[in-house]
Amino acid sequence: VVAVSAIVAPGLAAAANAPPPMKPNPPGLECKKAAAEFGADNLWWGQFSGMRDATDLRVPHAVSVWRCFRTEVDCKNWLYWKNTDFGFWTWVARCDHGFRP
Protein backbone atom coordinates (compact mmCIF):
# COMPACT_ATOMS: atom_id res chain seq x y z
CA VAL A 1 0.00 0.00 0.00
CA VAL A 2 2.84 2.36 0.76
CA ALA A 3 4.44 1.76 -2.62
CA VAL A 4 1.18 2.56 -4.44
CA SER A 5 0.64 5.83 -2.56
CA ALA A 6 4.25 6.80 -3.23
CA ILE A 7 3.60 6.38 -6.95
CA VAL A 8 0.27 8.25 -6.92
CA ALA A 9 1.39 11.15 -4.74
CA PRO A 10 3.96 12.55 -7.20
CA GLY A 11 1.29 12.54 -9.92
CA LEU A 12 -1.09 14.49 -7.70
CA ALA A 13 1.61 17.02 -6.91
CA ALA A 14 2.31 17.53 -10.61
CA ALA A 15 -1.39 18.04 -11.35
CA ALA A 16 -1.67 20.59 -8.54
CA ASN A 17 1.23 22.59 -10.02
CA ALA A 18 0.15 22.37 -13.66
CA PRO A 19 0.11 25.64 -15.61
CA PRO A 20 -3.28 27.13 -16.40
CA PRO A 21 -4.83 26.01 -19.67
CA MET A 22 -3.88 28.10 -22.70
CA LYS A 23 -6.61 30.40 -23.97
CA PRO A 24 -7.83 29.66 -27.48
CA ASN A 25 -7.01 32.24 -30.14
CA PRO A 26 -10.22 32.52 -32.18
CA PRO A 27 -9.77 34.02 -35.66
CA GLY A 28 -13.06 35.90 -35.53
CA LEU A 29 -15.53 36.55 -38.31
CA GLU A 30 -15.72 39.18 -41.03
CA CYS A 31 -18.25 41.53 -39.43
CA LYS A 32 -20.52 42.45 -42.35
CA LYS A 33 -20.90 38.83 -43.45
CA ALA A 34 -21.47 37.68 -39.85
CA ALA A 35 -24.08 40.42 -39.29
CA ALA A 36 -25.96 39.30 -42.40
CA GLU A 37 -25.85 35.66 -41.26
CA PHE A 38 -26.41 35.94 -37.49
CA GLY A 39 -27.82 39.46 -37.02
CA ALA A 40 -25.78 42.45 -35.83
CA ASP A 41 -27.35 42.36 -32.36
CA ASN A 42 -26.22 38.75 -31.85
CA LEU A 43 -22.52 39.49 -32.30
CA TRP A 44 -19.66 40.78 -30.16
CA TRP A 45 -17.47 43.37 -31.90
CA GLY A 46 -13.78 43.32 -30.94
CA GLN A 47 -11.58 46.32 -31.66
CA PHE A 48 -7.85 46.54 -31.07
CA SER A 49 -5.18 49.10 -31.93
CA GLY A 50 -1.68 48.73 -30.58
CA MET A 51 1.96 48.21 -31.33
CA ARG A 52 4.84 45.99 -30.33
CA ASP A 53 8.40 46.96 -29.48
CA ALA A 54 10.05 45.51 -32.57
CA THR A 55 13.60 45.92 -33.70
CA ASP A 56 13.05 43.86 -36.87
CA LEU A 57 11.38 46.26 -39.30
CA ARG A 58 10.25 43.35 -41.50
CA VAL A 59 7.70 42.44 -38.80
CA PRO A 60 4.55 44.60 -38.51
CA HIS A 61 4.86 46.65 -35.37
CA ALA A 62 1.49 48.41 -35.32
CA VAL A 63 -2.01 47.10 -36.00
CA SER A 64 -5.55 48.40 -35.96
CA VAL A 65 -8.03 45.55 -36.42
CA TRP A 66 -11.60 44.57 -35.66
CA ARG A 67 -13.37 41.25 -35.84
CA CYS A 68 -16.77 39.91 -34.83
CA PHE A 69 -17.52 36.95 -32.59
CA ARG A 70 -20.53 34.88 -31.59
CA THR A 71 -19.64 35.00 -27.86
CA GLU A 72 -18.12 37.46 -25.42
CA VAL A 73 -15.63 34.81 -24.31
CA ASP A 74 -14.26 34.43 -27.85
CA CYS A 75 -13.99 38.20 -28.20
CA LYS A 76 -12.08 38.54 -24.93
CA ASN A 77 -9.76 35.66 -25.80
CA TRP A 78 -9.01 37.35 -29.13
CA LEU A 79 -8.20 40.59 -27.27
CA TYR A 80 -5.95 38.66 -24.90
CA TRP A 81 -3.85 37.44 -27.86
CA LYS A 82 -3.77 40.86 -29.53
CA ASN A 83 -2.55 42.37 -26.25
CA THR A 84 0.02 39.58 -25.98
CA ASP A 85 1.36 40.20 -29.50
CA PHE A 86 0.98 43.99 -29.65
CA GLY A 87 0.87 45.06 -26.01
CA PHE A 88 3.81 47.49 -25.97
CA TRP A 89 1.46 50.41 -26.55
CA THR A 90 -2.32 49.94 -26.76
CA TRP A 91 -4.78 52.58 -27.94
CA VAL A 92 -8.00 50.58 -28.18
CA ALA A 93 -8.85 47.17 -26.69
CA ARG A 94 -12.55 46.52 -26.32
CA CYS A 95 -15.39 44.10 -26.89
CA ASP A 96 -18.86 45.56 -27.42
CA HIS A 97 -22.14 43.70 -27.74
CA GLY A 98 -23.69 44.24 -31.17
CA PHE A 99 -21.94 45.20 -34.38
CA ARG A 100 -22.24 48.87 -35.33
CA PRO A 101 -20.33 49.70 -38.53
Image (cartoon, grey):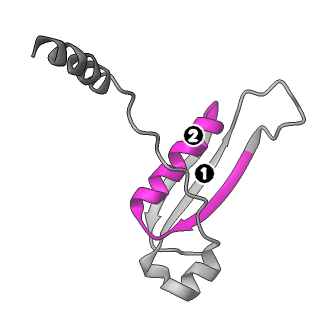
State left or right for residue 88 relative to residue 59.
left
Instruction: Give the camera-side residue of 20 and 54.
Output: 20
Residue 99 is inside the magenta segment:
no
The image position of residue 85, as x and y in percent, is: 64, 37
Residue behind mark 2: 83
User: Does 94 sit left or right of 89 as displayed?
Assistant: left
Q: Which residues are magenta?
A: 63-89
Of the residues shown, which amino acid type is indicated by label 2?
Answer: Asn
Residue 69 position in % (x across, y down): 51, 67
Q: How many C-alpha atoms fall within 10 Å of the one at disc 1: few (<14), some, or many (≥20)?
A: many
Q: Residue at x 54, y 75 (%)?
A: 100
Q: Secondary structure at mark 2?
A: helix
Q: In the image, which disc is placed on residue 48?
A: 1
Q: Residue furthest right?
A: 58
In percent of the image, x 55 and y 87: which residue is there? 37
Residue 30 location, x and y as percent? 65, 72
Q: Using a 10 Å C-alpha cutoff, classify the residue at mark 2 as few (fewer than 14 neighbours), some (14 to 19) or many (20 or more).
A: some
Q: Residue furthest left?
A: 1
Nearer to me, 81 or 51: 81
Q: Please report whichever mark, 2 or 1, sits nearer to the chain's N-terminal start.
A: 1
Q: Is residue 76 magenta?
A: yes
Is residue 99 depicted above or below 19 in this figure?
A: below
Which residue appears at 52% of the width and 74% of the height?
99
Q: Position of residue 10 (x, y in %)?
A: 27, 16
Q: Is residue 9 left or right of residue 40?
A: left
Marks counted in the figure total: 2
In what quadrant of the picture does the C terminus appear?
bottom right
For the N terminus, which image quadrant?
Answer: top left
Contact check, label 2 and label 1, Cβ < 8 Å: yes
**SS category of the residue bearing label 1:** strand
